[in-house]
Amino acid sequence: MRTLALLAGLALAIGARAEDSPERVTAAPSMDPAIATLLGQFCADCHGKDDPNGGVDLSSARTREEIYHQGRIWNKAVRVLRDHSMPPKSAETPTEEQRQQLAHWIESSLRDVDCASQNEPGRVTVRRLNRVEYQNTIRDLLDVEIDAARDLGSDPAGNGFDNQGDTLFIPPVLMEKYVDATKRIVEAAFSQEKSRKVVADHLPIADTTIGDLARPSITRLLERAFRRPVEPAEVDRRVALVTAAAERGESYDAGIKSVLESILLSPYFLFRIEKNQLPDGSKDAYRITDHELAVRLSYLLWSTMPDNELFDFADKGTLHNPDVLAVQVERMLQDPKSISLSRDFAAQWFGFRDMRTHEMDLRRFGNFNNLRDHFYAESLAFFDHLFRENASILDVLDCSYAFVNAPLAAHYGLPAVEGDTIRQVPLVDRRRGGVLGMGSTLVVTSYPTRTSPVLRGKWVLEQILGTPPPPPPPNVKPVNRDDTIKDGMTLRQRLEKHREVESCASCHAKMDPIGFGLENYDGIGQWRDQDNGLAVDNIGTLPDGTEVRGPEGIKTALLSRKELFVRQMVEKMLVYSLGRSLDYYDECTVRGTIERLEASQYRSHELIQAIVESYPFQHRRNSD
């Protein structure tokens, strides 16, 4: 019945007549009966209208417009077709020619949308500064060295990042912590001369002129703290605080402290607020202001407020000029503050942000505590190089260099270097280049006592390829975490037996071969040729039949599927930059960015420039 329902729906699309629905006909995909047959034969039983697996219903798209509106689903369909993970081995599977024919049709249907006519910027949620942004903004606003966010706690994550608008609200208990933090910050600012001058650089010559003398300082402080031009009434309210303090016989500094406290606890400081520009009820999209563009740009590249140069271009109204904007992006990427792309974006994506608090069993990996900070520094240096030096994003998969110091070089078996300073060194083989050879990656994909081919394979599928396996079925007994021989079987043999369970086979057939290829690395990334006295078996067979041997084979396989990683990186960066999940209307931005990357040999700066110039990054609609 599912097959018949799907075929009936597809037949409607094929046989639609102009007099019935002119708009649908102009949007209808170029579909022949062979495509309808393939979808019905290989997809409908599991992904039809009746209880579709994973909630994925492929039967409801009958026109090109509907396919476009379900773009997130159909793009995933292309990925699983290309990597042979769907249809599962337990079901009827298409020939390679049929597989490619179906994938090509889906891709061409998605590409056939007129992106020039798309004007949906997505929903912009008012975002609280996360703790990293708060810390950095306090530093740059007041020029004060203090752990401003120490008591704020961690931020909830969404879509893999802690800068997502839907998760960054302020519960009452957090507001109390902001009040306490503000008091500490204000006292610290006034105890340091350089910081005091930032907030109170006009001293009164008489009480009668105190308001006029305070106004310039307050105006400038408000503009920088709120990251936009301010209204006279906003300044007047703060000037009144200084005047009232003087009338009570309090000092000028006491009045300015009250002003600073009111600023730091204002929603306009704690949140990234973009004001509606159109009348209430309008649904039209419009370009954000240059000051809002400066804020989006600075928190993307620096995780902090705009600097004076960005403010100056915003004040002139020229920041949105493509030539000006391109120069500013390049300047900002060369600034040391762009380390935040590594520390906040890449570290969350690839999982090394928490490396310095990660734990391993020291009975098995006694050197881990000595290496933990170095693993973090290595990953940070690699991604800082990637973004600052405009390297190819494909270096993430494989490259001819690594970042090491003396302890890491010894651990990795590389030629000796001196000291603890991380530096770039050339590689003579492919064991270490890219993220798969980094200690941080290999640690976070291991159990505390042993490696895990399953965790490592799953990590590659999720983080590198963007094709995560579904969650394991309930009531399936996991493989014992002990890597010693049990019941006469090695860990690999136990995993292979585990794959004999039908409900486990399709996922493990994708994960395990990748993990087996990385088994030459132990739990903390040291190379090994033997494990428990046996030669490491580092050979795996991917779902498409490709045999891979060791990390070199895995890297080669990933590079042959580089389009999956490129799309994954574009989507991750777009999610991070917009602070929201992606939807069907973002596909044009994703695809346009991918095309620019392909034309530039995948240079990282082209990725940043494309996203900064994109429609959703520079536009919005009124908030509700």
Image (cartoon, helix red, strand yellow):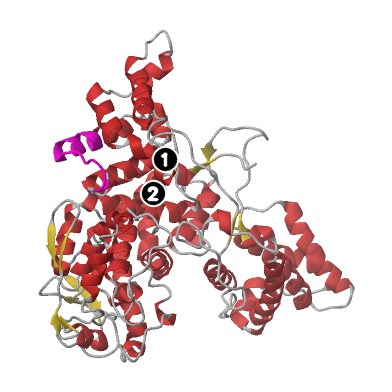
CA gap, disc 1 to disc 2? 34 Å
Residue furthest out toward the front: 487
Q: Judge depth for marks 1 and 2 and give the one in front.
A: 1
Instruction: Say how many tags the image has.
Output: 2
- Mark 2 falls on what kind of element? helix
Determine the residue located farthest toward the top in the rendered image.
Answer: 19
- Residue 239: image quadrant is bottom right
Percent coordinates x, y for residue 490 in the rendering: 21, 77
Q: Is residue 208 visible?
A: no
Q: Dot 1 surroundings within 10 Å: few (below 14), some, or many (20 or more)?
A: some
Q: Which one is nearer the viewer's eye here, 178 or 299?
A: 178
Nearer to me, 471 or 279 = 471
Find residue 181 and report its horizontal and vertical position in percent.
Answer: 66, 75
N-terminal of the pair, mark 1 or mark 2, is: 1
Which contiguous range is marked in magenta?
A: 88-104
- In the image, is residue 442 above or below residue 507? below
Q: Amino acid at mark 1?
A: Pro
Q: Which residue is mark 1?
A: 52
**Residue 170 percent location from the top left of the image:** 66, 62
Q: Secondary structure at mark 1?
A: loop
In this picture, residue 234 sits left or right of residue 525: right
Name the residue at 32% across, 68% down: 455
* Res 264 seen here: yes
The answer to which of 397 and 619 lies nearer the viewer is: 397
Residue position for label 2: 611
Task: Tell me the amino acid under the disc marked 2.
Answer: Ile
Image location of residue 113, percent across then percent down = 35, 30
| Residue located at (73% from left, 52% from top) | 232
Q: Residue at x 35, y 84 (%)?
A: 372
